[in-house]
Amino acid sequence: MPKILLRDLAHTRSGDKGDTVNVGVIAYREEDYPLLVDQLTAARVKEHFGDLVKGDVERFELPNLGALNFLLHNALGGGGTVSLMTDAQGKTFSTAMLRLELDVPAAKSKSKS
C-alpha cells in the first residue's frame, strides 16, 4: 500500500505538561480526518517515538476540530525544570510526529505528490 507522510495531511503543535508531552494533530482538510483517526493510533505513535516515550501514549479525538490530541507520558526526563534533555519542553515532538508514515489509498497518495 502506498505511504504518505503525516505532514502532507496535517499540522502539529506540541508542548510540555511536566514530564508529559502534549502533541496536537490537526487535519488540513475535513475529509482527511477519518484517515487520521484510523491510522494514527496511540500504539502507532508510541512505536514511532520508540525509546523517547517511556510511558503510555493516550489519544483523544476532537472531531469538531478535525484534530487528535496525544499525551506522551514520561517523555521529558522528569520535566522542564529538572530534565537534562536538549528539548525539555517537548517542542520538537511535533516536528518528529510529522515524519510518521501513513498507509493511504493510491488515489490519495497521487493527489498529495
Image: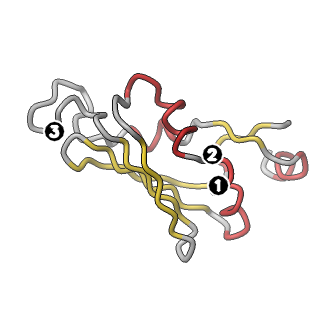
Residues 83 and 50: in front is 50
Residues 63 and 3: in front is 63
- Depicted 34 relative to depicted 17: above or below: below
Label 2, on which residue? Answer: 6
Q: Residue at x 43, y 49 (%)?
A: 58
- Rendered image quadrant of residue 54: top left
Do labels 3 and 1 touch, CB within 8 Å? no
Image coords of residue 48 (percent x, y): 53, 31
Q: CA distance from mark 3 to mark 2?
A: 27 Å
Label 1, on which residue? Answer: 36
- Rendered image quadrant of residue 87: top left
Q: Residue at x 23, y 50 (%)?
A: 17
Q: Residue at x 31, y 34 (%)?
A: 75
Q: Residue at x 48, y 35 (%)?
A: 46
**What numbered label is drawn on residue 113?**
none
Scheme of colours in the image: secondary structure
Label 1 CA crowd tier, 10 Å (few <14, some 14–19, many 20+): many
Label 3, on which residue? Answer: 80
Do labels 1 and 2 touch, CB within 8 Å? yes
- Rendered image quadrant of residue 102: top right
Image coords of residue 72 (percent x, y): 37, 42
Of tags 1 and 2, the one toward the viewer is 1
- Depicted 61 relative to depicted 53: above or below: below
Label 3 CA crowd tier, 10 Å (few <14, some 14–19, many 20+): some
At label 1, the amino acid type is Leu
Element type at marker 1? helix
At label 2, the amino acid type is Leu
Q: Residue furthest left?
A: 81
